[in-house]
Image (tube, grey):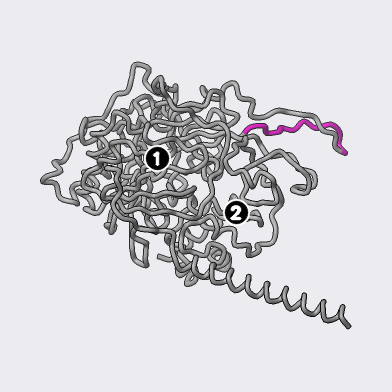
Amino acid sequence: MTIVWTLTIIMVIVLLLVLTFGSNLAKASSKELRALEAQPEGASDDSFVEEAYKVNLKKGFDISLTGEAPTPFDGIEQVRSATYALKPKDFEGMMPIPKVIPEAGTHVKAGDPLFFDKKRPDIMYVAPVSGEFIEIRRAEKRSIAEVVILADKEGVQYREYTLPDLKTASQAELVGFLLGSGVWPFIRQRPYDVVADHNEMPKAIFVSTFDTAPLAPNLNFAVQGKDAEFQKGLDVLNCLVPNVHLGLNGKGKPADAFANAKGVHRHQFSGQHPAGNVGIHIHHIDPINTGDIVWYLDVHAVILIGTLFTKGIYDTERVIALTGSETPNPRYIRAHQGVNLESFFRDVETETTETVKTKDGDKTITKPLVRIVSGDLLTGKKVKKDGFLGFFDDQVSTANEGDRYELFGWLVPQTGHPTISRTFPNGFFPKVKYPADTNTNGEKRAFVVSGQYESVLPMNIFPQHLMRAIQANDFERMEGLGLLELSEEDIAICEYVCTSKQPLQQILRKGLNMMREQG
């Protein structure tokens, strides 16, 4: 009888503990969902944040990888390639076969029109350098993959512009000039993350001055010596829409051009990735509601616009980070948009051949070894080693191909990799850096509710419920769950930590395209 009473008391105590823990957990979760991570603070002693609105993000995850580009103490190397290209597929929503303007063999200057989208003929996509237009490279169903230019050897020749006077030009005149000059494609809009619609003015323009993606470049280097051009670019944006927001890095000292920017609202963001994403800034400063439009640009675009209005030239040169564990000599370089990557990876063996035995006899197969990505490893696009830099990219990354299996997975010690899971020993050491590979560490599984997405996305959004609504083609729920605020770069970190191995970026793009087609 004594044993029975003892067991009963123990069970009651355990039940009370479980109920108490569950109640506290529910309260904490509820509180966490109600209270955003944005925490306005008072004035700071630092001059560059004196007027800035501070946002301290509690959620996120930094993916620590080897192969970071070191600080360029000895200056940044300037690189030119024999060929350059624009890739129509870099622009979401563009028709697969845009109208190409010059004939093969025509000499073009930097800023001369190359093609336009037949659905939006006012927006010109122009040559990044001067040279001979030599080739249209096609992909499936004769879609245009690349428009290639053989660059001039003696330097860049620039198209001449008649610049509008910012003091007297109307908004319509300024928009018309930007459309024809080739600058407009650098202006993107939320929702849908597409090239901005010039027929609808936004409520605000956002610029993020830092990037927290894996191995991302330090944008302070991008603006070195370009202070006047950056400020002029901001002045032009203010003439378009007098409500420009600048996102500053709260974990380091911004460049003077960022910290001392005039005519903008400054906001300081601190936290792990995706703290540098412009979508996170929009969400915490001026969220997108139904019917709202917001434009955004990156630092390179602002500098390009400023250069156009100060020097009268279309100069696409930018600072690019060559990164990754398989990149020979990771470093910063200066190169023009659309640069050919072959010279950087000529000695990298990206694939090999091997012979395997089949029932039909021996067969030679190609086995990939290294993946080259234009952009960061979360959202970039795979390219060949003789491919070209993407239109919006300022980073090239490499990773080992993940074509191996880990025996017993997390049950036995394995080579470390960045993870939020404490089932791996390296989950307790988030600062340790590891070489990247493309292994998904498991097959695609049932789409289960785990709470992982919410733990790394610093937005008041339920990503998993949103993904389900997209898969169900439920337009009303998609919009209500925050689809219009998101882009692939925002949801990429959720895809990285996803236990179910779901292609969240593809799912999100499907939802954005469906919603856009519905109008």
Quarter of the picture containing the C terminus is bottom left
Task: Say whether residue 200 is visible.
Answer: no
Residue 191 visible in image:
yes
| Residue shown at 49% from the left, 52% from the top | 488
Tell me residue 479's x, y (percent): 45, 67
Secondary structure state at the residue bearing disc 1: loop
Residue at x 67%, y 33% (from the top left corner): 368
Q: Is residue 94 above or below residue 200?
A: above
The location of residue 263, given as percent across then percent down, is: 21, 47
Indicate the amino acid at tag 1: Gly
Image location of residue 23, percent across then percent down: 59, 74
Q: Is residue 441 left or right of residue 475?
A: right
Instruction: Look at the image and say whether residue 364 sits in the magenta stretch.
Output: yes
- Horizontal placement of 126 versus 352: left or right? left
For the residues labelled 2 and 1, say whether their Cβ atoms are less than 8 Å apart: no
Residue at image coords 54%, 28%: 386
Which numbered circle lies on residue 252? 1
- The crowding category of the residue bearing disc 2, from other C-alpha atoms within 10 Å (few below 14, some 14 to 19, many at least 20), is some
Q: Residues within 10 Å of mark 1 (few under 14, many from 20)?
A: few
CA distance separating discs 2 and 1: 33 Å
User: In terms of image quadrants, where is residue 128?
Assistant: top left
- At mark 2, the secondary structure is loop
User: What residue span does the magenta drawing correspond to?
Assistant: 359-370
Q: Residue furthest bottom?
A: 1
Q: Which residue was labeled with disc 2? A: 503
Is residue 451 found inside the magenta-colored segment of the image? Answer: no
Pick whichever, 73 or 486, lies toward us: 73
Q: Amino acid at mark 2?
A: Pro
